[in-house]
Each structure stands twice: as C-alpha cells, then as structure tokens.
Image: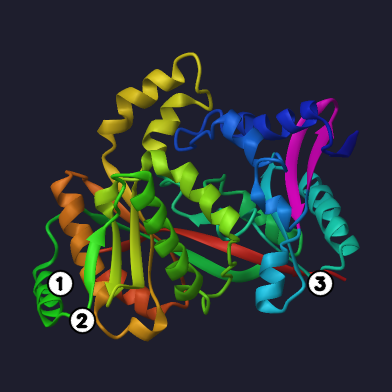
C-alpha cells in the first residue's frame, strides 16, 4: 500500500534528504550534496527564500519504504516580477513507477492549487537562482557545480503526468586553451579603444569585498531582468548565496566591468567543486573535510556560472573582453576544461558565441509546465 506524507518532522525531513542516496547508489556520475547543507537549505530560519515564499515537501511511502519525493513551492518574487500566478515543484526523485510519480505530482499540484496557482512549473529547487531543470540528454558524465543530474527514466515519468516542455537550458563543454586568436585580437582592439575598465574581484579586506558584492548585486538586478524565468533575488538572498560560494570563489576568475566608475557588467567562473563533493559522499565528518582539503587544489575543470552586461553598455564589447580574460586566466591556472551554463535555448546570441569560442552542447536540461485545473 502506498501513501503520501507531508513532511513536518525532523525525522521526515531527514528521510526526504537521504532518499536520493538510494536512487543513485549505483550511479557513478551523481554528486551527493552535503547533508548538513540540505538541512540548512530547508530550514526557514536559515534560508531567506522563506521570508517571501512557502514550500511543502512530500514523501511517497510504499510497504514501509520511501519510494519518492517532491516539493511544491510558491515564489512571490517571480510572480510579482512577471505579473503571473505560477507555482513551482522541485526536488523530484522517484523509483521507476508511474503510479508513484502520479501520486507525488497529484499532491504537489493540489497544494499549489490551494495556493491559487494557475500553472505548475519545474523542476526548480527552489527557483532559477538555485539548481533547476531536468537532465534529458548527457547522462554519461558528472554534472558541473550547481547543475542537476537524474536518471533518464524521469523524463517519461514526468511527461506521463501531463507535464509539457516550457524551456530547454543548454550546457556547453569546451577545452581550456589559450583564447582563440580571433577573440584575443578583438578583445585587445576593444580594450585599446577604451571607454570601460575590467578588473578582478577584490577580496583583500572585508570592506573591499563588501563593496564589490554591492557592485555585482547592482549589475545582477539590471542585466538579467529581460531573461525568461529571471527571478530577482532579495538582497538577503543574494548575500546568502555569496556567503555560500565565497569559500570556493577564485577571485581571478571573477571580472567586473565599470564605465566611469559605474557598474556595467560582471562575469563569474567557479572551480567545479563537484569534483570535491563527489568524494565526500554527503558527509563533512569524519573524513569528508580531509578529502575537501586534499582535493580542493586538484580541481581540473570550471564552470562559467554567469556573465551579464547592463543593457545601456551592451554594445561596447565588454562581453568579448570577459570571454578573453576568462580563457586567459583559466589557461594560466591550468584548468583542463570548462562548462558554459546554463544558456536558454532561445538566447540565439549567447548560443552563437558559445559555439564560436569552441563550445559544444553536452547536456540539455528541460523545464516543464502543467496548467492547473
């Protein structure tokens, strides 16, 4: 007999967090999150997402065993910004059983319906500012940091529950070499022309770091506002994300562009910390922290996480300089490969650029919608 459980207790939350370890126990490409981090993520007192939105977690239990999980969540920030009434689902994990999947989605959608949502969109864990998208192509390699991974059969389960494609997100893989000659020459020409300056993140003191974080937040709030699915983070959410990423940020891979001292654009590439996390198997202690210290300086690849220029400065070639400097620094730091992700499938300019600088699509992720009736 199967039943759906609304997660309320700490014991149930731990079951929710640990269930993926069963699903992926034989999947060498899965990267286990730190259990401690996931506890904090779902804690309303520690995750600023809960200051403006709600979430409910569900477990599917059959014959005393956990066989699936899903979340349902509102996102006030998204709906205010886009003038929509969309609800979201995420953290979907399930055995290969259509009935289990149907019960999970039924529970999530009913919860969203009670919140007056008109569409269920996902997977979002919890939003586009977090891990999102279902992997539908490219299962044969480990995901890069902050990207998702799942069994191939999930697509059939989800589509059979009435979910239809809303948008695909593309991930480009490229070898790290010296910048392509054409790009290097173009970048040099643009920099010689002047009109803006590009520098790296200043982490020398707390004061300079705080100032740069404020600069990046200003750019972030303006540069992506016209993108599909963009969700403006609150200042608390942004600061929270930065504090989480700060231990793995390489300052020389973060570039900030300014025009007459005013913020114009920024680019962030992160060492692929999944290379370390996978070896920790979800635990910091007793040996996880030692593995982290040992492997931290052996990471062979990086992910270009985000790159954006404020609209009024987009015709100055700042993006070309970002690409060139990212290539130069990654090569100098001896990274072997990099991922440029994610890029919306309908962002023709960014997809063309990724291809022109040597990238090839190696993973495809999908966001699904279902009208709530």
Q: Is residue 235 visible?
A: yes
Q: Is residue 40 left or right of residue 299?
A: right
Q: Which residues are magenta?
A: 56-73
Determine which residue is flagged by label 1. 183
Q: Residue at x 11, y 74 (%)?
A: 182
Determine which residue is flagged by label 3. 118
Whole-percent x and y of residue 320?
Answer: 23, 73
Extreme residue toward the front, this view: 207
**Disc 2 residue crowd, few under 14, some 14–19, many 20+, Cα 10 Å:** few
Q: Secondary structure at mark 1?
A: helix
Position of the C terminus, as image quadrant, is: bottom right
Q: Is residue 172 left or right of residue 157?
A: left
245 to 369, vertically: above or below? above
Determine which residue is flagged by label 2. 195
Q: Secondary structure at mark 3?
A: loop
Whole-percent x and y of residue 91?
Answer: 66, 47
303 to 313, vertically: above or below? above
Q: Is residue 320 left or right of residue 81?
A: left
Q: Residue at x 88, y 58 (%)?
A: 110
């Amino acid at each position: 007999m199967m039943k759906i459980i609304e997660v309320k207790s700490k014991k149930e939350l731990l079951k929710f967090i640990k269930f993926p370890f069963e699903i992926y126990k034989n999947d060498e490409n899965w990267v286990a999150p730190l259990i401690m981090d996931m506890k904090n993520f779902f804690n309303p007192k520690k995750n600023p997402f809960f200051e403006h939105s709600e979430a409910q977690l569900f477990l599917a239990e059959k014959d005393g065993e956990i066989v699936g999980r899903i979340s349902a969540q509102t996102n006030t920030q998204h709906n205010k910004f886009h003038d929509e009434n969309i609800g979201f689902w995420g953290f979907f994990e399930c055995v290969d059983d259509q009935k289990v999947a149907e019960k999970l989605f039924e529970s999530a959608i009913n919860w969203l319906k009670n919140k007056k949502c008109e569409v269920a969109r996902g997977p979002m864990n919890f939003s586009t500012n977090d891990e999102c998208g279902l992997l539908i192509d490219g299962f044969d390699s480990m995901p890069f940091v902050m990207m998702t991974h799942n069994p191939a059969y999930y697509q059939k389960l989800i589509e059979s529950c009435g979910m239809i494609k809303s948008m695909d997100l593309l991930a480009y893989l490229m070898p790290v070499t010296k910048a392509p000659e054409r790009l290097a020459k173009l970048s040099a020409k643009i920099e010689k022309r002047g009109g803006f300056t590009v520098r790296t993140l200043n982490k020398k003191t707390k004061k300079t770091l705080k100032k740069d974080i404020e600069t990046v937040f200003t750019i972030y709030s303006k540069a992506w506002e016209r993108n599909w699915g963009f969700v403006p983070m609150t200042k608390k959410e942004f600061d929270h994300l930065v504090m989480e990423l700060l231990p793995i940020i390489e300052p020389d891979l973060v570039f900030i562009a300014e025009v007459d001292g005013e913020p114009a654009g920024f680019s962030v590439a992160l060492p692929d910390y999944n290379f370390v996390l996978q070896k920790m198997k979800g635990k910091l202690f007793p040996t996880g922290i030692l593995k982290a210290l040992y492997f931290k300086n052996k990471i062979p690849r990086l992910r270009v996480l985000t790159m954006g220029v404020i609209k009024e400065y987009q015709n100055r070639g700042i993006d070309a300089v970002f690409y060139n400097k990212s290539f130069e620094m990654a090569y100098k730091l001896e990274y072997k490969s990099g991922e440029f992700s994610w890029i919306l499938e309908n962002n023709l300019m960014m997809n063309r650029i990724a291809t022109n600088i040597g990238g090839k699509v190696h993973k495809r992720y999908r966001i699904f919608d279902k009208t709530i009736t």
